[in-house]
Image (cartoon, helix red, strand yellow):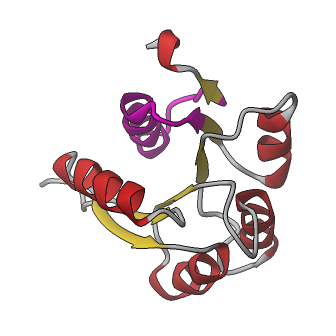
Amino acid sequence: MSEPVKRILFVDDERTICKIMVSRLKKSNFDVMAVESGAEMLEKAKDVKPDLVILDHLMPGMTGLEACHKLKMNQETKEIPVIMFTGHHKVAFEEECLNAGAVGVIYKPDVGGLLQLAKDVFAGREVDPAVEEEDL
């Protein structure tokens, strides 16, 4: 008997990135839906209970860190793992993400690293919180 398909909620305010990533994730046999803001993610996460949230950081209205923190503070959604997928490189950013409740950080455009980290999370494997493209 095969395992159920894992559901991913992908969050990025750039539509082109959403389209590309939804396509790539679906090709890796994930059920994927996309939203364009942290506020949308918080509502959708309550409704659909995804198995994983992949979250951009730099978005208008609410940053990914703020959205991650709010997701983790809600009793209904606090157990949903979050991967930050961002182009935001800043000293101590990875630590801030982990403190907000994320399980890891992948820097754009490392799609291969993102796919591997998602698979590791679903397999229950220990994850390296930050994977750089050159690590793969």
| 64 in relation to 74, above or below | above
**Considering the image in quadrants, where does the C terminus appear?**
top left
Residue 101: x and y, percent?
76, 52
Q: Nearer the viewer, residue 71 or 40?
A: 40
Residue 74: x and y, percent?
76, 78
Q: Nearer the viewer, residue 3 or 134?
A: 134
Residue 92: x and y, percent?
87, 31
User: Which of the 4 quarters of the picture holds residue 123?
Assistant: top left
Identify the residue shown where x is 61% and y is 40%: 87
Q: How many marks?
A: 0
User: Which of the 4 quarters of the picture holds residue 94?
Assistant: top right
| 33 in relation to 63, above or below | below
| 88 in relation to 80, above or below | above
Q: Nearer the viewer, residue 106 or 116?
A: 106
Q: Is residue 39 left or right of residue 49?
A: right
- The residue stretch that appears in magenta: 106-129
Q: Nearer the viewer, residue 64 or 14?
A: 14
* Residue 111 is covered by the magenta coloring: yes
| 50 in relation to 133, above or below | below
Identify the residue shown where x is 51% and y is 11%: 135
- Furthest toward the left, the residue is 1
Residue 30: x and y, percent?
27, 56
Identify the residue shown where x is 65% and y is 27%: 130
**Considering the image in quadrants, where does the N terminus appear?**
bottom left
Q: Is residue 15 left or right of residue 73?
A: left
